[in-house]
Amino acid sequence: MHHYDTIIIGAGHNGLICSAYLAKKGHQVLVLEASDNLGGLAETREFHPGFKASVAHSISNFSTKVAKDLNLSAYGFT
């Protein structure tokens, strides 16, 4: 059985950021997500047949410090 220092419930952007910081510090982290997709409310969703929208704009206050700390520009985040 694998040992985890931390188990995070939910792979929304807060859960993913938290897990990334912990993993960066050497913690063994397990992220559990009920959905088939990651991102939580930042995920693009079909709210009516044929109509999709992303609410990612609601995280417009995303910290530039977090982006820099996690080197997100290397993965296309600008």
Image (tube, rainbow, N blue to C red):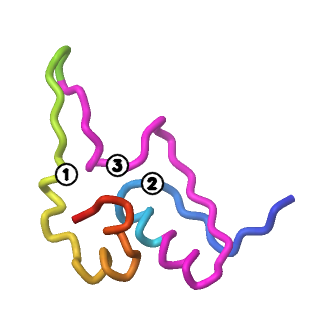
Q: Choose between 1 and 26: the one closer to the eye.
A: 26
Disc 3 to disc 2, C-alpha distance: 6 Å
Q: Which quadrant would the C terminus be assigned to in this image?
A: bottom left
Determine which of the numbered discs, if any, sits on residue 36 in the image: none
Q: Is residue 36 left or right of residue 30?
A: left
Q: Choose between 61 and 69: the one closer to the eye.
A: 69
Name the residue: 68% across, 75% down: 5
Q: Residues within 10 Å of mark 3 (few under 14, many from 20)?
A: some
Determine which of the numbered discs, if any, sits on residue 40 in the image: 3
Contact (Cβ within 8 Å) of mark 3 with mark 2: yes
Q: Is residue 15 left or right of residue 9?
A: left
The secondary element bearing badge 3 is classed as helix
Let me know if residue 46 is in the magenta part: yes
Return the disc, 3 or 2, that comes first in the chain's sequence.
Answer: 2
Return the disc, 3 or 1, that comes first in the chain's sequence.
Answer: 3
Amino acid type of the residue tagged 3 in the rendering? Gly
Q: Residues within 10 Å of mark 2 (few under 14, many from 20)?
A: many
Q: Which residue is mark 1?
A: 56
The secondary element bearing badge 1 is classed as helix
The secondary element bearing badge 2 is classed as loop
Name the residue: 48% across, 35% down: 36
Q: Which residue is mark 2?
A: 11
